[in-house]
Image (cartoon, rainbow, N blue to C red):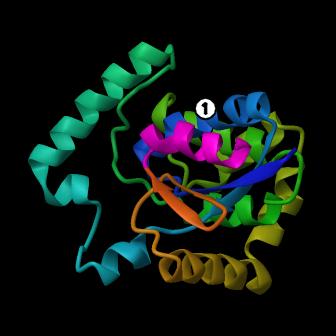
């Protein structure tokens, strides 16, 4: 691996679902390492004066996003189902991803959570759903879920969210390569290209 791409994602983000499905293959093809960075958008949106997702605050923007997701997923051959609740609370999933951030299972876990939300329309705030995803990637749910509720993990996720804010992250997915920010799944190819240059 010649360089790395930091992948900043929030589990409630629909566009992050597509990036999650594509990033590992694109990075591997370019010889670039992926560094997984779960964080929370809620505090960042609050700093911008928003009380929720901009896709809910601005109905026209939300309607466009749902249709755009349908088109993009069809074009890319990805399964897709509009969730019956949006956004879903991704706090537990983000804490588990923080536990797993340095493990080989991180990519599979993150994909599993996004698929639970945006393909299976399951409630990713439910420990049973997260437990099912953990089991599906060969991890012991009980042990991992207990660790995810520890004060050290809670603090680490808060620190990660503060870091995202300090570095100028304002939405997800976001990517950093050599300190440069790329925002949006449609910028993944540019980020990978810079990391490989």
Depth order, front residue of 96/174: 174
Locate the C terminus and report the quarter of the image it occupies.
Answer: top right
Q: Residue at x 24, y 73 (%)?
A: 50
Depth order, front residue of 127/174: 174
The x, y position of residue 33, in whole percent, is 80, 47
The x, y position of residue 148, in whole percent, is 76, 69
The x, y position of residue 21, in whole percent, is 60, 32
Query: Residue 135 is drawn in which quadrant?
Result: top right
Query: Residue 110 is drawn in which quadrant?
Result: top right
Q: Residue at x 88, y 61 (%)?
A: 143
Q: Residue at x 63, y 62 (%)?
A: 38
Q: Is residue 147 above or below residue 3?
A: below
Instruction: Specify the segment rendered in magenta.
Output: 184-197
The residue identified by callout 1 is 21
Q: Is residue 151 above or below residue 95?
A: below
Circle 1: is it few (<14), some (14-19), or many (20+) Cα within 10 Å? some
Left/right placement of residue 16 relative to residue 146 reads left
Left/right placement of residue 4 relative to residue 177 reads right
Magenta region, main secondary structure = helix
Q: Residue at x 20, y 55 (%)?
A: 56
- Residue reaching furthest to the left: 60
Locate the N terminus and report the quarter of the image it occupies.
Answer: top right
């Amino acid at each position: 691996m010649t360089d790395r791409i930091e992948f900043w994602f929030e589990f409630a983000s629909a566009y992050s679902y597509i990036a999650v499905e594509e990033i590992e293959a694109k990075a591997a093809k370019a010889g670039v390492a992926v560094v997984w960075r779960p964080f929370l958008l809620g505090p960042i949106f609050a700093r911008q004066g928003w009380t929720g997702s901009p896709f809910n605050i601005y109905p026209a923007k939300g309607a466009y996003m749902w249709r755009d997701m349908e088109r993009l997923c069809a074009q890319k051959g990805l399964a897709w189902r509009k969730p019956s609740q949006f956004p879903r609370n991704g706090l537990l999933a983000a804490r588990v991803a923080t536990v797993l951030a340095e493990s080989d299972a991180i990519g599979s876990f993150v994909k599993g959570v996004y698929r639970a939300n945006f393909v299976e329309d399951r409630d990713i705030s439910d420990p049973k759903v997260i437990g099912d995803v953990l089991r599906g990637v060969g991890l012991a749910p009980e042990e991992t879920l207990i660790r995810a509720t520890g004060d050290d993990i809670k603090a680490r996720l808060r620190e990660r969210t503060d870091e995202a804010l300090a570095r100028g992250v304002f939405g997800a997915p976001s990517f950093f390569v050599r300190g440069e920010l790329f925002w949006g799944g449609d910028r993944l190819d540019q980020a990978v290209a810079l990391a490989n240059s």
